[in-house]
Image (cartoon, helix red, strand yellow):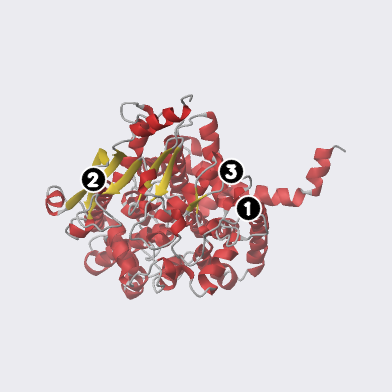
Amino acid sequence: MSRTSSYIIRNSKYIFLCRRVASEFKFSAVICIMPPRNRQHVKSKRDASKEAKIVPADFTSNINTDSKNNAPWTPTVYTAFKLLMSLRLCAAVWSNISDCDEVYNYWEPMHFLIQGQGFQTWEYSPQYAIRSYAYLWLHAIPSYIYSTFLQSNKILVFYFLRCSLAFCCALSEVYFFRAVCQHFGPNVGRLLLTFLTLSSGMFIASTSFLPSTFSMYVSTIALAAWFQQKYEVAIFATAVSSLVGWPFAAILGLPIVYDIIILKKNPILFIKWSLISLFLIAIPLIYIDSRHFGKFVFAPLNIVMYNAFTSHGADLYGTEPTIFYFQNGILNFNLVFVAALISIPVMLLLRPLEGYSKKLKSPPLYLCLAPLYLWIFVFFPLAHKEERFLFPIYPMICLAGACTLDTIQKMYHNLFLKRRFADYLEITNGISIAFCITFCIMSFSRTIILHRGYHAPIETFMVLGKFSTEESLHPLPPEYPVNVCMGKEWYRFPSSFFLPDNWNLKFLKSEFRGQLPKPYSNLPNATKIIPSDMNDQNLEEPSRYVDIKSCDYIVDSDYPNHSSLEPRYSRDLNWNITYSIPFLDSQRSHPILRAFYVPFFTDYYSSYVDYNLLQKANIRDRLIRKKRKILPK
């Protein structure tokens, strides 16, 4: 017997489990993105029999409006994928980096993994180890392959990864759309597709390099599988979302657990696939992280322990009032967010008018929307609030909003038009069209102002690549190390992917009194070294700052209000402005017009400052001094 055969026999159970899990995802993914004309040739008999049983039914009414003859028009899955993919690629190119945590906790460590340098935060210190290198490698491997074999330009590597995230997001969304059409009916499905494609919230979250975004992708797959009663996939996807992505995303899986154990009375299935998922995910996760940190590490457990069982925890990094998440929801989803919040109450109040059938689909409606409400009940009361904390429920907000709108259409039909029209969609489509048009206008307005008002940092750092290659703009040779300094704008740094080779970011002291990140060590096994001058209490570390004399460039916003630590460098004769772009001054702009772009009015009632790239006036002196040092005596 060969070595290969003996290996397969010894590991047959493990291989079977891997193939079982992979086959579920593989089939769904292929079917989702395949053109309709080809899809019928690859569907298995198993799926054909399942589809025969799953008829898109009216989930709140006994009126048969979803039969084959009367079903409303709904985009095919292939059309939906093309639409979603187009919008997600737009987000990959035009969306901003809205959170410095994304840069310093994910883009920078990944830059270190593939380029050998980058910033390290205290979370990656082996002393604390609350972030996972395994999660980083999921993104670093394709980025490394692209940079090695296709394109070494670091900015293109950055956008390659963003486009890859766009593809993953579109794939998870179209799988979700397909499941919603089957379980909730085509009207809810097409409303969901409208909200997913056009909402500002999905535009922001879809291509963010964050564990909460990863959890959004995989939790969406889990919920879609659950709607189709593919419980094995739902359990496994929830485990991936929680262990590889964000541990707190496990909250979204609680209704799935309730359905399997309480309603289906099948605890064996849940226990079996929970153990399988833990075995397949936790072992490689622990192995990779332990290799990088130099000790046994289970990062998901560490982050839960830090946030839940330490005296300081996440509250050190800013607290917000309860209204913060409501404001955020209105900005990113406008009318849909309001509709989502009242989805279950509206449906319960209107149940007598709806004429609910006794035979409801499984899982039941209230349980399908429960993940949204669970997330709200858990996260809204917490003091520490971040926009990214809501990313995992963004698709659920769209689904709940679609369900509410669909129910309102049925209510209007049952109250006023039931005798004249058998199908509620024959006359109530005007309600959904008016709602969607208003939603689209507000969403486009929000997305445009985000790009126009706040895209200056990325634009400014993209200019550095041009500067580094043109001697007329940058007189220093490529081998000279160059320091780009930031003071109060440190949190808008778009990552080292925008710095040319041999250029480094340095920090100037500003009014900020928290802890800034520190470059990784240049020594071998840098991830195993406990860095000096780091703490988990967000205490300022003065060692992070450099003297302004060591700076060759400064990136800064030119606000009229200034202090001794945050001067207006544009007024300093030692610095020349080499590039400038307008940047929205939110403090001196109209609160509504800075949040939504209204042609003519926004520009008139909003205030802008210059976002500047400043070059040291005597930068050529560095070259002269260097030449003097190498001249023979």
In this figure, what is the number of numbered marks?
3
Quadrant of the frame with the N terminus? top right
Residue 581 in the image, given as x and y percentages of width and height: 24, 42
Q: Which residue is mark 3?
A: 44
SS class, disc 3 = loop
Q: Is residue 212 left or right of residue 287?
A: left
Q: Which residue is mark 1?
A: 528
Distance between the Cα atoms at labels 2 and 3? Answer: 67 Å
Q: Nearer the viewer, mark 3 or mark 1?
A: 1
Residue 285 in the image, given as x and y percentages of width and height: 63, 54
**From the viewer's perspective, is residue 25 above or below residue 377?**
above
Q: What residue is drawn where x is 32% and y is 45%?
A: 555
Callout 1 amino acid: Lys
Q: Nearer the viewer, mark 2 or mark 1?
A: 2
Q: Quadrant of residue 467?
A: top left
Q: Nearer the viewer, mark 2 or mark 3?
A: 2
Kindly indicate whether the residue at mark 1 contacts the one at mark 3 (C-beta within 8 angstroms): no
Distance between the Cα atoms at labels 2 and 1? Answer: 42 Å
Q: Residues within 10 Å of mark 3 (few under 14, many from 20)?
A: few
Q: What residue is drawn where x is 59% and y is 65%?
A: 301
Labels 2 and 3: the sequence-earlier one: 3
Distance between the Cα atoms at labels 3 and 1? Answer: 49 Å
Q: Farthest top residue?
A: 632
SS class, disc 2 = helix
- Depth check: give the residue in front, 60 or 618: 618
Q: Quadrant of residue 318?
A: bottom left
Callout 2 amino acid: Ser
Q: Which residue is mark 2?
A: 570
